[in-house]
Image (cartoon, grey):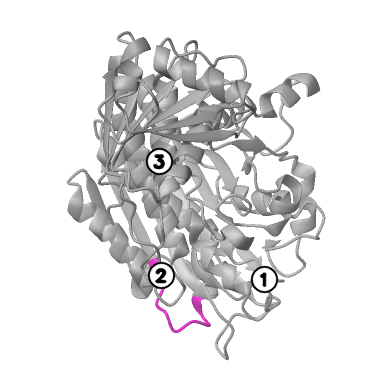
Amino acid sequence: MDFHCMDYRASVAQGPALSQVNADALVLVLTPEQSVTGDPALDSLIKDAVSAGDLTLKAGRTLYVHRPNGAKVTRVLLVVSGDDSAKSFKAAVLKGVAALKDLGVAHMAVAGALGLNLSCEHAHSLVLAVAEGTYVFRQTKPSAPKPVALKKVTVLCGPDELSAAKSALVRARGVAEGISLARELGNLPGNYCTPTHLANEARQIGKNFKHVKVEVLDRPALEKLKMGSFLSVTNGSAQPPKFIILRYQGASAAQAPVVLVGKGITFDTGGISLKPGAGMDEMKYDMGGAASVLGTFRAIAELQPKVNVVGLIPTCENMPSGTATKPGDVVTSMSGQTIEILNTDAEGRLILCDALTYAERFKPAVVVDIATLTGACVVALGHQHSGLFSSDDDLAQALLRAGQQAQDTAWRMPMDEEYGESLKSNFADLANVGGRDGGAITAAVFLSKFAKAYRWAHLDIAGSAWKSGAAKGGTGRPVGLLTQFILGQAEAGQDALKPQVVKAVGKTKAAPARKAAARRVA
């Protein structure tokens, strides 16, 4: 799937050159403190609009002007950003795209007022905003709106910012491709996006990019690997399970890889522990972790960072039937640990734990699993941040920083060993659920039992992978965070990727104040 035939450019234009830009429309981003451009025609327009009350310098306000006096550009859209940050700039550009997309604009130029220097972060935000604002799901909806006319976007900046802006546009375009792929896969209904479909999508990435190698394991291979926990989830489904392995080699074979593990439940009924009917249609998004791994591979295949990455995607359906796994059943995981399945709707951890064991063979630098794992994480964090769990402070900080840089934030949650007490079982090494209290944490502690051989982190994206309500649809998160993390690891060099001895799961040694600061997301 290719979503962005968009032509992104950076060009030098300041002061009086702004209103003379050769484009169908100029989006001019102002702030409450910065509303002067240095262009006489535009500054006169802004002054008059503010004086007349047509434009208020408050975040989110817009004013469209057709054929303004003294300007060569036909359309000018004034958009007020909350401040000069890249995050606010993205929101402003998104407003601009929404206002112009029905006007037949094929070439949009974007500039900022004096003092709003468009850095590489702003250029990155611009691409993400355009990609988000122009995305429309069409695969199963013939009546969907036609594609927007917009084909070219130019960011106007100063000569000192030109080189960085061009590089940022290239990088952001790769990330946007990955985000759109993850969104599209998530939005597909469960009868389209099956485990086989995900496997074929992975193969397509491997076909399109020579640096990516793809292997898909079927049930006989999973049985040979003794992935009893994974296979127990798929027992009730007619759809065959798949275990997708992607390898990207951008560095020497001697360099330990980053391993991404994505939960790929293409539809989750809850199994015998059946979910309530209301809202169950959204369980097509339960493969959000798998989608984010595929989207990240799409991005890094385009950007080709000097790092090695492995993607592991266990994927199947969780369905009720006469052959489905029952509450109380005990299964043996690939690690040899036995699991009492008290609730078949806690299935994501059952497929992930075998994938985490499989990850050991790659001798990874770090392993990050990504899963729409628990409703408890949504209760705890809402839809703003993904939940981040790790007993490795350095790894957690690297992921938090990547999320802040990518505007795809996470929030660190506790991993105290006492949370594992509720996972004890009289009939197996551990149970697959504890009580209701701290459900997102006990789920993460369960996964940690299978991730002791390497540095590990878990991202619970149940609240961030999709939106409900009138805006229902996949978000493509956390492709931005993951891609930024991998790019950061590549830029840091081999020393940053050396495997380290992982600490035991438990309380970190950080003082309470330092821990609070570490977990705070700007």
Q: Is mark 1 on a helix, strand or loop?
A: loop
Amino acid type indicated by mark 1: Ile
Q: In the image shown, does 141 or 188 lie closer to the viewer?
A: 141
Q: Residue at left 39%, top 77%?
A: 240
Q: Residue at left 73%, top 55%?
A: 376
The answer to whether residue 61 is seen in the rendering is yes
Magenta residue check for 485: no
Ranked by sequence position, the earlier of labels 1 and 3 is 3
Circle nearer the viewer, 2 or 1:
2
Instruction: Please indicate whether residue 329 sits to the left or right of residue 138 in the image.
Output: right
The disc at residue 193 is 2
Ranked by sequence position, the earlier of labels 3 and 2 is 3
Mark 2 Cα-neighbour bin, 10 Å: few <14, some 14–19, many ≥20: many
For label 1, the residue is 341
Q: In the image shown, does 429 or 353 lie closer to the viewer?
A: 353
Q: Are marks 2 and 1 in contact (CB under 8 Å)?
A: no
Instruction: Please indicate whether residue 495 sits to the left or right of residue 265 in the image.
Output: left
Ranked by sequence position, the earlier of labels 2 and 1 is 2
Q: What element carries label 2?
A: loop
Q: What element carries label 3?
A: helix
Magenta residue check for 236: yes
Amino acid type indicated by mark 3: Val
For label 3, the residue is 130
The answer to whether residue 496 is seen in the rendering is no
Q: Residue at left 58%, top 73%?
A: 281
Boundaries of the magenta span? 234-242
Amino acid type indicated by mark 2: Cys
**How far apart, in angstroms, are the residues tagged by discs 1 and 3?**
45 Å
Compared with 56, 381 (above or below) is below
Instruction: Please indicate whether residue 449 sits to the left or right of residue 354 in the image.
Output: right
**How far apart, in angstroms, are the residues tagged by discs 3 and 2?**
26 Å
| Place of residue 361 in the rendered image (x, y in percent of width and height, measured from the top left) | 38, 48
